[in-house]
């Protein structure tokens, strides 16, 4: 089935580890240049709800066409080609009807941030305490009838840093570990699927599933935990050199912030 793209990384736990290691678990109240916006609340604005309904209806149509073509596919290569074709169609539709809205949303956030002298704005869901809530101001600017001009200046330097997890997944050692883990999981899935088919009772099936889950978990610890630890250490080192008080995942940054992705990539590549 074709799907709406969402961020996914096998090192997704790293961001939480970084935040906990570099800050007291929250953005402090005395940082006056940090704002936050409730993206979930903005997503509930009527115009976004309408676009999501359009996308859902379009995706439903594509799914039906996709399933019909996949059934007629002669081999795995054909299935892969069909999947990529329909995924591209869905992505293009997303950009067509949702792109202008997201662009206006970003301009509204930038405009409000500039008037508040904010150096960084994050998603509300990662804020436990402190920061300036600019959600309503952003919604008011977004909903206004006039066009929104880009800010005349870039945001000031921020003590809040971020790393792009997707970019870190491109580091060769991470790619290698991900590929090895994927292959191992596929192999073990086949082995344990055969064992499940031969199981004689629900208890036997539960035991086989428990063995499989432990096997996969142990392999993840072996392959991925060292990389998570290395990423955490590399990020902490870069953050220390740049005098950052907090580092989060790029997905949690709405505006501004200090990008240290390349620095962390370079550290991991050593």
Image (tube, helix red, strand yellow):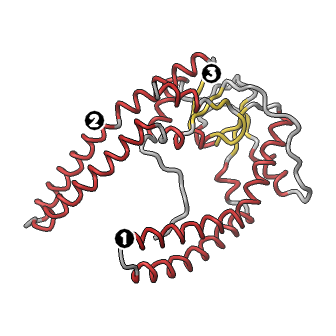
| Label 1 vs 2, first from the N-terminus | 1
Mark 1: secondary structure = helix
Image location (x, y in percent) of residue 166: 52, 43
| Label 3 vs 1, first from the N-terminus | 1
Hey, which quadrant is residue 10 in on the image? top left
Image location (x, y in percent) of residue 130: 67, 30
Image: 241 above or below 234? above
Compare residues 82 and 122 and report the one nearer the observer: 82
Q: How many marks?
A: 3
Residue identified by numbered label 1: 76
Number of residues whose C-alpha sits closer than 10 Å to that of mark 2, classed few (under 14), some (14–19) or many (20 or more): few
Q: Residue at x 26, y 49 (%)?
A: 184
Q: Say which mark, if any, is on residue 222.
A: 2
Left or right: residue 3 compared with residue 175: right
Image: 87 above or below 57? above
Quarter occupied by the C terminus: top left
Q: Say which mark, if any, is on residue 244.
A: 3
Number of residues whose C-alpha sits closer than 10 Å to that of mark 1, classed few (under 14), some (14–19) or many (20 or more): few
Q: Residue at x 28, y 56 (%)?
A: 186
Left or right: residue 150 compared with residue 4: right
Hey, which quadrant is residue 30 in on the image? top right
Alpha-carbon span between mark 2 and mark 3:
31 Å
Left or right: residue 154 compared with residue 188: right
Alpha-carbon span between mark 1 and mark 2:
31 Å
Taking the view exactly as shown, the residue that stands out farthest to the right is 146
Alpha-carbon span between mark 3 and mark 1:
48 Å
Image: 40 above or below 91? above
Mark 3: secondary structure = loop
């Amino acid at each position: 089935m074709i799907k709406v793209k969402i961020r996914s990384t096998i090192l997704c736990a790293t961001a939480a580890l970084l935040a906990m290691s570099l800050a007291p678990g929250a953005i402090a109240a005395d940082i006056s240049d940090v704002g936050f916006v409730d993206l979930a609340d903005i997503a509930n604005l009527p115009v976004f709800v309408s676009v999501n309904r359009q996308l859902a209806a379009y995706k439903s149509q594509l799914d039906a066409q996709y399933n019909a073509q996949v059934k007629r596919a002669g081999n795995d290569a054909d299935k892969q080609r069909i999947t990529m074709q329909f995924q591209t169609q869905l992505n293009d539709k997303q950009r067509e009807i949702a792109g202008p809205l997201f662009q206006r949303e970003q301009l509204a956030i930038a405009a409000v941030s500039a008037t508040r002298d904010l150096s960084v704005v994050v998603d509300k869901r990662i804020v436990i305490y402190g920061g300036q809530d600019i959600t309503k101001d952003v919604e008011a600017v977004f909903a206004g009838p006039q066009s929104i001009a880009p800010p005349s200046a870039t945001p000031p330097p921020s003590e809040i840093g971020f790393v792009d997890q997707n970019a870190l997944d491109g580091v060769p050692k991470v790619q290698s570990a991900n590929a090895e883990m994927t292959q191992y999981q596929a192999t073990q899935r086949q082995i344990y699927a055969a064992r499940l088919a031969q199981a004689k009772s629900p208890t036997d099936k539960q035991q086989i599933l428990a063995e499989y889950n432990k096997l996969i978990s142990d392999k993840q610890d072996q392959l991925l935990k060292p990389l998570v630890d290395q990423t955490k250490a590399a990020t902490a080192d870069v953050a220390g050199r740049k005098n950052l008080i907090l580092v989060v995942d790029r997905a949690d940054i709405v505006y501004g912030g200090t990008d240290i992705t390349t620095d962390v990539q370079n550290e991991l590549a050593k």
